[in-house]
Structures are given as C-alpha cells and as structure tokens.
Image: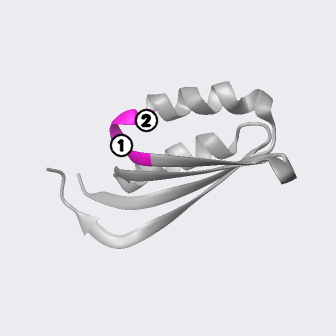
Amino acid sequence: MEHRIAVIGIIVEKYDSVDKLNSLLHEYAEFIVGRMGIPYRYRHVNIISVAVDAPQDVISAMAGKIGMLDGISAKAAYSSAIFGEE
C-alpha cells in the first residue's frame, strides 16, 4: 500500500478532551513519526503537530476522528511524494 508523509495540526481548546485525543493518538501509534506539543497558556489552548507516515486513507481517518472530538480542531497537510510500503 502506498504511504504519504503528512503533518496533522491540532488545536485543543477544551482540556476535557485530552484523554480521548491521547487515546486516538495511541491507536495510530504505528504511523506516527513524531509529535510536538506547545501549551499556549496566554490563549488557553494547546497546539500539537503530529508527523505521520501512512496510507492516505489512514491519515484522513485519523485527522477526521481527532477533529470530531469536542473542543479539538485538526487539519492534515500532505506531502506530494508517494512512497511504497517498506
């Protein structure tokens, strides 16, 4: 199956949803290359970027599930390169 590299940008506005977010990220752990979180205390939000290497449908499903959580927004930005599974 062909893989793509993508970054999923996540904005957390409701801290109550963090446990569900972490659970979803754990569910997709095999596809996650790395993640960076920035607590932006001044605006009371957390900004998270997650780098992934996965089939496009997996990336879309992951971003969609994250974005459906209450108080959380997510968008994926894809690389134009397509890789074969190694």
- Residue 38 falls left or right of residue 35: right
**Callout 1: 10 Å neighbours few (<14), some, many (20+)?**
some
Q: From the viewer's side, name the closer residue of 30 and 36.
A: 36
Query: Where is residue 17, by image quadrant?
Result: top right
The structure residue drawn at horizontal position 52% and vertical position 44%, both measured from the top left corner, is 62
Q: Position of residue 8 (x, y in %)?
A: 54, 55
Q: Position of residue 28 (x, y in %)?
A: 43, 35
Q: From the viewer's side, name the closer residue of 1 and 75.
A: 75
Q: Secondary structure at mark 1?
A: helix
Residue with the mark numbered 1: 31
Verify whether residue 30 appears in magenta: yes
Residue with the mark numbered 2: 28
Q: Which residues are magenta?
A: 28-34
Q: Which mark is residue 54?
A: none
The structure residue drawn at horizontal position 48% and vertical position 47%, both measured from the top left corner, is 35
Q: Secondary structure at mark 2?
A: loop
Amino acid type, mark 2: Tyr
Verify whether residue 64 appears in magenta: no
Q: Position of residue 72 (x, y in %)?
A: 73, 44
